[in-house]
Amino acid sequence: MKWINAFCLICIFLCATFFNKEKVFAQDSELQQGDSLFAQGNFFEAAIAYERVYFLSPSAEERVVANLRKAAALKQQGEFVRVVSDLQRSLPHAGNESTQIEIIYEMALSAFLSGSYSLAHSLVSQLDYQFPQAGLYKDLPLLKGMLMIKMQRWTELALYADELALQRQPSPERDIFVAKLKELLLEENQPVQRDPEKGRLYSTFMPGAGQIYSGSTGQGLLNGFSQLASLGVAVAMGINQLYFSGVIIGLGAFQSFYFGGVKQASNLTVENNLKRMIRFQQELETILLEIYQLPLF
Amino acid sequence: MIRAFVFVCCALFFLNTSAQESVRRELAFVRHLLSRNELKESLFVLERLQAKETSLIDSVNYYHGWIRYQEKDLLPSAAFLLQVSSESPQFVKSRLFASYNMAHAGLVDTADSVLARLHLGDSPVLQALTNFERAGVALLGRNYDEFSERSRDFSGDWNAFALQERNLVEYALTLKQQPGRSPAVAGLLSAAVPGLGKIYAGKTAEGIAGFLYVGAMALASWDFYRKLGSSNGLFIVSASITGVFYLGNIWGSAVAVRRLRNEFNHEMDQRILFDMHIPLRNIFQ
């Protein structure tokens, strides 16, 4: 009886001490918890769970794994800038080449997605230089092409299209897409980038001309007409001996339209340049994606 | 039977210790998150902690308050910081920051009463700092008597806030010398000469612009009246616009005085708060 009693009490003691769910800090279970939260779409809590593993784990390898998974959770939340800074801390501890490649690739991708194209480009170059064998890693070839488009490196892109095509099975489709891409990249097909200063200058001497030069003919005509009309009102008032009103109303409106038009011409030139470039880049991106999706050798 | 009771007590003790140990570990994790400036995440972890020991409850409240302070959520921050007990090593810091947060949120009386109840033992620097903060709070409340009483104890001996002490004295002088302009006088001046009220309020450029607008519209109206007569539509429209401009200028001048006074007070408050903040950040890094 005495032994049974002792046994029961030991059981109570052990149960009370070890059945406390908060005590579980085994990093594996935390990783699994993070995975399960990630699978449920709860990326915020998953990122915290992975960071906890990073904080608690004594194993550098496990910390890298947790950090990479956290990066995936952050990407799902659209926090691309944080992905870059978070992964940076794991780079010196990445033991093998494949992990290093994965980290740099994820950093480059996130830098690209956050709009830091020069950082993404330098990371991709680092991959090319340090790990030439990583050329076909995940979507790295696509990322390279997209970066060339965003950074407007047209000559490089035309050469790269050939490289991409060589990695794909020969097909008429492939040749058509490559030819289309190269044709678009010809200098005469590239979007015209007009000079805002010229736009401003044209409108200074010829009302509405700067807007027409920038590509907004309608706005140019409207501005020119407004200036003529206000000048007409001023002259008509002067003829009718309404001198003060002519100066104040007619010339007042004219100077507003005139100076406004000069400023608008410069702004419109910048705006239209950007619009044309975005449209052109979108066209290139679509073709690049078509080539990229063709079956590989 | 007694042995069983002792065992159960031990088990419960270990259960509690283990739970509190996990809270302690989570607090270390919160510190780690804070060092990475992951405020949202730290708050999430903190909100799920169930601390029972006083020291842990204090830490939870302190971190809660500190995160809210970093998020510039000042009143909730003050509420959490005020819950930190006097046994906590963060007690004085919590009280001083809570008071600062309340002063920043405009609750100057409450901020002062928090500082007044703060017992600092015999730390001369903290006593001088509290006196400095109370002087700042008095100045924010435009309580000049209280300020001059507190500023008499400014020694200039503490490098962390010697410059700020001098600044507060300077602000007090500037505030006292603030010109007392009247909105009614500004309105009357603008009624006499359009734009003059704004110049009186200190907005010279706005005053000249107002004069030119009203004057130009009045000239145009006179032109229409002279050539087309008082029943002409152009004159009626132009005269109406002139009237609106004229009345708007009077109203704008009166408002400008109030706006300028508010701008001045706001700027002074920002300067005072800035100078109150620097020593807190310097001393409690």
Image (spheres, rainbow, N blue to C red):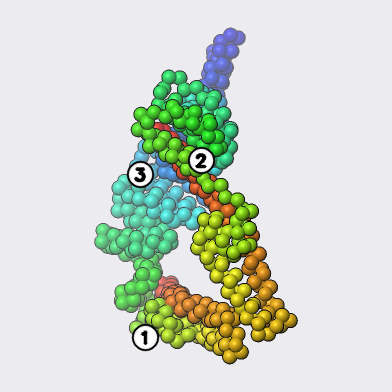
Q: Amino acid at mark 2?
A: Lys
Q: Is residue A173 above or below residue B134?
A: below
| Residue at the image point whose x is 37% and y is 76% from the top | A169
Q: Is B118 above or below relative to A68?
A: above
Q: CA distance from mark 3 to mark 1?
A: 53 Å
Q: Chain of mark 2?
A: B
Q: Give the farthest residue toward the left.
A: A129
Looking at the picture, how far across and down is residue B191, in whole percent? Answer: 63, 62
Residue drawn at 55 percent across, 38 percent down: B142
Task: Determine whether A15 is above or below B211 in the image.
Answer: above
Mark 2, Cα crowd under 10 Å, few <14 / some 14-19 / many 20+, is: few
Q: Position of residue A172 (x, y in %)?
A: 40, 83
Please, what is the three-letter code of the amino acid marked with disc 3? Glu
What mark, if any, has residue A61 been given in the picture? 3
* Residue at position x 42%, y 52% in the image: A82
Residue count near mark 1 (Cα–Cα under 10 Å), binned few <14, some 14–19, many ≥20: few
The kind of residue tagged 1 is: Glu
**Sequence-earlier tag: 3 or 1:** 3
